[in-house]
Image: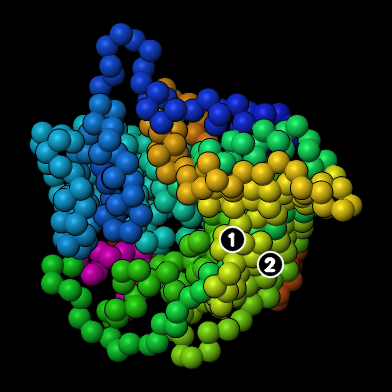
Amino acid sequence: MPPRTNRRRFLQQTAATLAGAAALGEVRAQADEPPAPIRLGIIGCGGIMGHHVKGLVGRREAVSLGWLCDVDPRQIDNLARLVTSDFQPRPPRTTARYEDVLDDPHIDACLIATPHHWHAPIALRAMQAGKDVYIEKPISHVYAEGPLLIAAARKYGRVVQQGSQMRSSPVTAKAAQLLQQGILGEIKVARAWTAETRTVARPLPDGTPPPGVDYDRWLGPAPVHAFNPHRFHGTWRMFRDYGNGEIGDDGIHDLDMAAWGLGVDTLPQQITARGGRMLLDGHASEYPDNMNVTYEYPDGRLLIYENYPFTPYGLHGFDNGNVFYGTEGYMVFSRRGAFSVYLGPKSQPGPTEGKELRGQTGYAEHMADFLNAVRHRTPPRASPEIAHRSCALVHLGEITLRTRGQLDFDPRAERFVDCDEANHLLTKEYRQPYGLPELV
């Protein structure tokens, strides 16, 4: 287990490092001559990667793009259009094989934004190849992958950053300053929610992959399944073979912030989970569309997660958010760039942030933090240790829901107590030859 961190010191460090961060300044060396660009390989060209590339286009002095990799050539083409001639004189090379990126000795780091089931297999091989890795959340598809990623980062001396952008957001920095001052007293409970209207995805018949798609490689370590439009771009998240449902797709952001606000540096010892189906009209997902999970930590603190698919109004005015409950007051916090503090038994209004930082979600600052860590070999804000503790909440909550509904967990042994069925779900079978590499 990692050494215990003093909560106040942790928040002071968070506030100090975030408040002083500048997206470009952090990635510049102190010498007179600008440092050589960090050479990046992009693996997974859909979805969130477009946001990252848009941000990188403005940093041509800091980075260069060596590769665009995706099993779907259409996604490569779409992303390539963002990389204009003004960014770098030569366009990135393209491939459907991530191995081509890892075999290139000129690549310093990889940005990985594939479906979840590919995160760990690619990231582990990238670290073995001497590359630093930025992995979109969650870094693990199943619990057992988290400790492997931690071990690999240590063994190979690599920088690993999870895409938990709120760790670097300006609103997080301001909230950290208040929390380290003790404005809420001792924080006993943290609440996280995802409350967004979701549309019903009705079942579709199987079909054939789009032209040019290497579908076997897209499946990778997952079991063989006939191509289905829902089991592909976007909606793959609904299936356990590839994703982690709502709690692991959007909820992981708010779970991570709940763990941050609570200041936990260990894993929970008891989990209670309930969930079901509110979207009753033939929803195709294998996951429940609503969940309520309570995590109790060894010192008695609680973390509560909720998600609801029917709310056009959110909770406390936010579709995604947190509440940190302390002995002297509470803070409503949202990754949309806002927070409000309420103090005392009458909930008197305290400090509020809701206009200046609205919409600043930390993407640019978080990528700058990763590049700075790569440049100077310093720990990133969403290290694999931090990421694993947050991703574990996804996996432990979902496993509890699938089994007994309430389970005891041993944080030191990282095993459920007296539940073989639950312990079996901490890992999974991998289809060869796409499984996990040995850490040699």
Q: Position of residue 262 (x, y in %)?
A: 71, 46
Q: Compute the Cα span from label 1 to label 2.
A: 19 Å
Give the residue displayed 65% in from the left and 59% down from the top: 192
Q: Nearer the viewer, mark 1 or mark 2?
A: 1
The mark found on residue 412 in the picture is none
161 vs 336, nearest the viewer: 336
Can residue 396 be spotted in the picture? no
Residue at the outermost top position: 32
| Left or right placement of residue 438 versus residue 196 in this view | left
Q: Position of residue 358 (x, y in %)?
A: 51, 47
The mark found on residue 318 in the picture is 1
Amino acid type shown at disc 2? Val
Please state, as top left, top right, bottom left or bottom right, where the C terminus lies in the image: top left
Q: Position of residue 154 (x, y in %)?
A: 49, 34
Q: Which residues are magenta?
A: 214-225
Badge 2 marks a residue whose secondary structure is strand
Q: Are marks 1 and 2 in contact (CB under 8 Å)?
A: no
Badge 1 marks a residue whose secondary structure is loop
Q: Position of residue 117 (x, y in %)?
A: 40, 62
128 vs 237, nearest the viewer: 237
Which quadrant would residue 212 be assigned to in this image? bottom left
Residue at the outermost right position: 345
Give the residue displayed 53% in from the left and 38% down from the top: 170
Residue neighbourhood size for the residue with mark 1, other residues' Cα within 10 Å, grouped as few (<14), some (14–19), many (≥20): many
Which quadrant would residue 128 be assigned to in this image? top left
Colour option used: rainbow
Amino acid type shown at disc 1? Phe
- Residue 224 highlighted magenta (yes or no): yes
Give the residue displayed 15% in from the left and 56% down from the top: 77
- Examine the rendered structure and indicate whether residue 253 appears above or below residue 225: above
90 vs 242, nearest the viewer: 90
The residue labelled by disc 2 is: 293
